[in-house]
Image: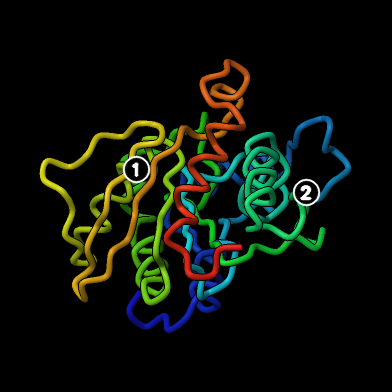
Amino acid sequence: MKKIKNLAQLDKAVVACTLCPRLVEWREEVAITKRKSYENEKYWGKPIPGFGPSDAEIVIIGLAPGAHGANRTGRIFTGDSSGDWLYRALHKAGLAKIPTSTSKNDGQELINTRILCAVRCAPPDNKPSNEEKSTCAPFMHRELELLLPTMNSIIVLGNFAFTALIPQLRVLGFEIPNPVPKFGHGHKFTALSPEGKKVVIVSSYHPSQQNTFTGKLTEKMLDRVILTATRGSKRAQ
């Protein structure tokens, strides 16, 4: 990953990755069999790169692409209910150009924000293995490293993203509280970079249907998390 000099190169490397046989087989099978409601669409069926500017101050980390969301559309958190919730909230906060994200060609742009996933391929049952998580980790490491000069806050969507982030912070040389704070919606802590830069880590329940349909996560709860993350931004609108 050290040879990758910028996010454009990293995105290309992500899309070309075939390191996890189970995930490759699954994402491609889904792209062929499709969901009936999307049977006339051409699925992306490849790993999903991050989305957003290379000088973002706010970084959002999810679990993995949805089989019929990002794996279909080719853009992270796009084309499914989770994305509907996330982009609507980002738009309200002035961090997304439009309140929806339906395809790679819909004109959506993120403002001062970049979204990435801990695992870049859609996994069966939304459950990547520990080995797959470990294999994909270098992509996350390099992306965070490239974003570090401008990054002021990180929003983690769900416990999986939270547990993936903590070791990355350690490898990057961050000082984090001891004991490590536990995941919980609205919980936050500050990590200190080797250069002495403070980065605020904010946790949120994932905007999955399991959480939004049951009321475990409401729009106001997600809005508050995003507001917390924007407070440290020099370019917040």
170 with respect to 57 (left or right): left
* Image quarter of the C terminus: bottom right
Expressed as whole percent of the image width and height from the top left, the position of residue 161 reads 39, 43
Q: Along the polypeptide, which appears first: circle 1 or circle 2?
A: 2
Residue 158 position by quadrant: top left
Residue 4 horizontal side relative to residue 32, left or right: left
Per the rendering, the mark at residue 209 is none
Q: Residue furthest left?
A: 178
Q: Residue at x 53, y 32 (%)?
A: 221
Residue kind at label 2, given as amino acid type:
Thr
- Label 1: which secondary element: helix
Q: Position of residue 201 (x, y in %)?
A: 34, 50
Amino acid type assigned to the residue bearing label 1 in the image: Phe
The secondary element bearing badge 2 is classed as loop
Marks 1/2: CA–CA distance = 26 Å
Which image quarter is the N terminus in? bottom left
Q: Residue drawn at (45%, 48%), measured in percent from left and top? A: 228
The image quadrant that residue 212 belongs to is top right
Q: Find residue 162 and name its label.
A: 1
Q: Residue furthest top?
A: 214
x then y, percent, for residue 169: 25, 58
Residue that appears at 11% across and 45% down = 178
Q: Which residue is mark 2?
A: 102
